[in-house]
Image (cartoon, rainbow, N blue to C red):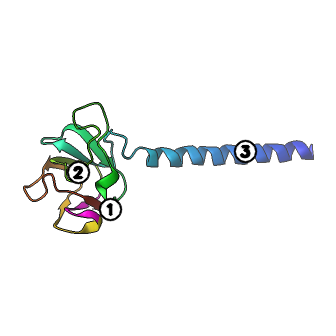
């Protein structure tokens, strides 16, 4: 009887740990998958949120190794210096910069907004940080 109760406790602990691992993994896996969801900043290669999207869930200091996802014409292009519009579906403001690691000109994209980038930032964004 004692062994049975011990096994039940171990099994219950395993289920709890398994549930935590599954829920923790899904939030982080959503970023950079080509699907803009709530809580993410989306950068688009064309104006008016057109074509492929680069979706960020956490800050990114250098876009050099990041690419648009999907099957549209921008897919496979690096997002570094190749962005014309945005959609901030996050509840936080994001700071964007024209050079990697917060260098160059800086600006911000307010929470829950979308639009085309100004001339300063069109095809120039190289890093983004959650404020």
Q: Total label count?
A: 3
Residue 96 position (above or below residue 10): below
Q: Earlier in the sequence, mark 2 or mark 1?
A: 1
Q: What's the distance in space between the residues labelled 1 and 3, CA to CA?
A: 41 Å
**Above or below, 55 relative to 131:** above
Q: CA distance from mark 2 to mark 1?
A: 22 Å
Q: Which is more foreground, mark 2 or mark 1?
A: 1
The secondary element bearing badge 2 is classed as: loop
Q: Secondary structure at mark 1?
A: loop
Disc 2 residue crowd, few under 14, some 14–19, many 20+, Cα 10 Å: some
Residue 16's place in the image compared with 59, above or below, is: above
In the rendered view, tell whether residue 127 sits above or below residue 23. Answer: below
The residue tagged 1 is 61
Residue at the spot of label 2: 112
Question: What span is in magenta?
Answer: 92-100
Q: Residue at x 27, y 60 (%)?
A: 127
Q: Mark 3, residues whose alpha carbon is within 10 Å: few (<14), some, or many (≥20)? A: few
Q: Nearer the viewer, residue 109 or 16?
A: 109
Q: Considering the numbered disc 3 on the image, is that residue within a helix, a strand or a loop? A: helix
Q: Earlier in the sequence, mark 2 or mark 3?
A: 3
x and y, in percent, of residue 39 in the image = 34, 49
């Amino acid at each position: 009887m004692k062994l049975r109760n011990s096994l039940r406790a171990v099994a219950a602990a395993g289920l709890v740990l398994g549930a935590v691992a599954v829920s923790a993994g899904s939030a982080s896996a959503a970023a950079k998958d080509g699907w803009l969801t709530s809580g993410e900043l989306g950068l688009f290669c064309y104006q008016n949120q057109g074509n492929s999207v680069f979706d960020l869930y956490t800050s990114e200091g250098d876009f050099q190794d990041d690419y648009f996802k999907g099957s549209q014409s921008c897919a496979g292009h690096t997002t570094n210096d190749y962005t014309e519009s945005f959609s901030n579906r996050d509840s936080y403001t994001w700071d964007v910069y024209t050079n990697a690691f917060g260098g160059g000109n800086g600006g911000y994209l307010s929470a829950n907004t979308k639009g085309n980038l100004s001339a300063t930032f069109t095809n120039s964004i190289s890093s983004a940080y959650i404020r």
